[in-house]
Image (cartoon, helix red, strand yellow):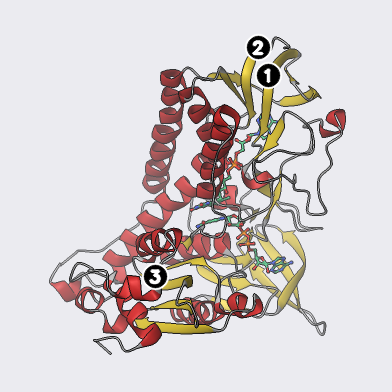
Amino acid sequence: MADYDYDVLIIGAGPGGYVAAIRAAQLGLKTACVESRETLGGTCLNVGCIPSKALLHGSELYEEAAHGTLAKFGVKTGKVEIDVATLQGEKSAAVKELTGGIEFLFKKNKVTWIKGQARFADAHTVEVDGKRHTAREIVIATGSSVTPLPGVEVDNDKGIIVDSTGALALSAVPKKLVVIGGGVIGLELGSVWRRLGAQVTVVEFLDQLLPGMDGEVRKEAGKLFKKQGMELKLSTKVTGVAVKGKKAVLTLEPAAGGASETLEADCVLVAIGRRPNTEGLGLEAIGLETNQRGQIETDHAFRTRIDGVRAIGDVIPGPMLAHKAEDEGIAVAEYIATGIGIVNHAVIPGVVYTMPEIAGVGLTEEGAKEAGHKVKVGKFPMMANSRAKTNRDTEGFVKIIADADSDVVLGVWCIASLAGTMIAQAAQAMEFGALSEDIAYTCHAHPTHSEAIKEAAMAVRGKPIHM
Ligand code: FAD
Ligand code: NAD
């Protein structure tokens, strides 16, 4: 057998790559991980999940104090102000702590971090800064980057046309922010700056926000964001953005064609999706082609068409989510070490961390019908949930979609202040093949927002108690 430097070499230290590296090392494999950033953790820890959640949390505290329910509960405040520099400092501190934490875990588990950009020389060899490193198995976990909008030049330093990385680093609240793309990034970061005082317009090509989510949830989300003061321009496409002095001027057109209009903004956030990172990786050197969407195709064991080369995370098909990448990271390491691994791609929850949060797992009602299921749907409004009523956060609902014949739960969708936490029990129930009846007869602590999931399950075949 050939003599390699490592049993496994992983390219990329995002949630896919760093988790794969740690698991591989835990399983006794000699492991290296190549990462070109200055810090570990990938998009998620450096410019994604973590910094966005820090700003979402801070801006939520500000909104609650400035315009929320504090006074209702007798909490008196003076004039509430936002200090963006302090907020940004707290965000950076969280990022530093968490990325440093991964470095600590690499050392603890004896994962070698090779710093630099990896490029394939052959299927078992990568070159980093002119030095060659060989491995029995190489895992591509290079993640994704912002999809550019043709003709629109992002300049995060200037702060007029920015992508998500720029929108996470603004040093002041823009007066008028236009977000191109009503997806997850647009709504999360649009919410941050709206809460802090920006006038926000979201321009979305489709007729509803949040593609991929359940239809009723998308409609309700649109209503809620409008109520919060976001202007939504649906079925509208941006055909150009010009910078004039310190302002941006956008040209918009109806998606179906027609007369164009212009819109002025102090800041434009381009958030129209992300694309897999494969450029500069030297895939041609190993004869590995990407699919039409630029993704690397794999089988269930994350093997590519090339022997000894596997891929996980945002660079392969599936939702671009950190926890999906992490689970694939664990599974790929276990496949390599033991020949067995598991990721149930049918049960991957998704959460939009706005207020209220929007979360779902499994099939949408539309998707379930398209897949040929006869469905029964149970819904329960947060307005009828005692804890939500008491806390005065009654927006949203829970919706459970079950197969009408077998009662197997096919999908669960929630809009609720705590939807991101509530969805975990739905995912676990689905992982165990739950019927809606199983959820309905599971004792839920009172008073909790999660009781709305139990009541929605009761509504699938009968009646909830509190409605
Ligand atoms: P990445 O995290 O992109 O990591 C890949 C790493 O590989 C990068 O660090 C890159 O530098 C490195 N790399 C690439 N090519 C090479 C090379 N040739 N050599 C060496 N290194 C290389 N997901 C969630 O689940 N929840 C959220 O709340 C959430 N919020 C987000 C907010 C924002 C603003 C953004 C942009 C994304 C968010 N995501 C969220 C998505 C999440 O960040 C990604 O799905 C996740 O990071 C993908 O993990 P990954 O390991 O596949 O790739
Ligand atoms: P997205 O795919 O969620 O949304 C992009 C939106 O832009 C879509 O609604 C699309 O119809 C619209 N669009 C595309 N071209 C347009 C155009 N020319 N004009 C107007 N609208 C246009 O992508 P995103 O929001 O950029 O997020 C990228 C990825 O990052 C997503 O896959 C998401 O899963 C991940 N992410 C996840 C979280 C989370 O889990 N909370 C947070 C942020 C990002």
Q: Earlier in the sequence, mark 2 or mark 1?
A: 2
Q: Residue 216 versus residue 169: which sits nearer the camera? A: 216
Looking at the image, the residue that sits furthest to the left is 74
Identify which residue is drawn at 77% across, 30% down. 307
Quarter holding residue 31: top right
Q: Residue 359 versus residue 301: which sits nearer the camera? A: 301
Tag 1: amino acid: Ala
Residue assigned mark 2 = 5
Q: Is 199 left or right of 449, judged from the image as shown?
A: right
Residue assigned mark 1 = 135
Q: Is 383 left or right of 264, judged from the image as shown?
A: left
Q: CA distance from mark 2 to mark 1?
A: 6 Å
Residue assigned mark 3 = 356
Q: Residue 405: which numbered mark, if any?
A: none
Q: CA distance from mark 3 to mark 2?
A: 50 Å
Identify which residue is drawn at 46% across, 24% down. 26
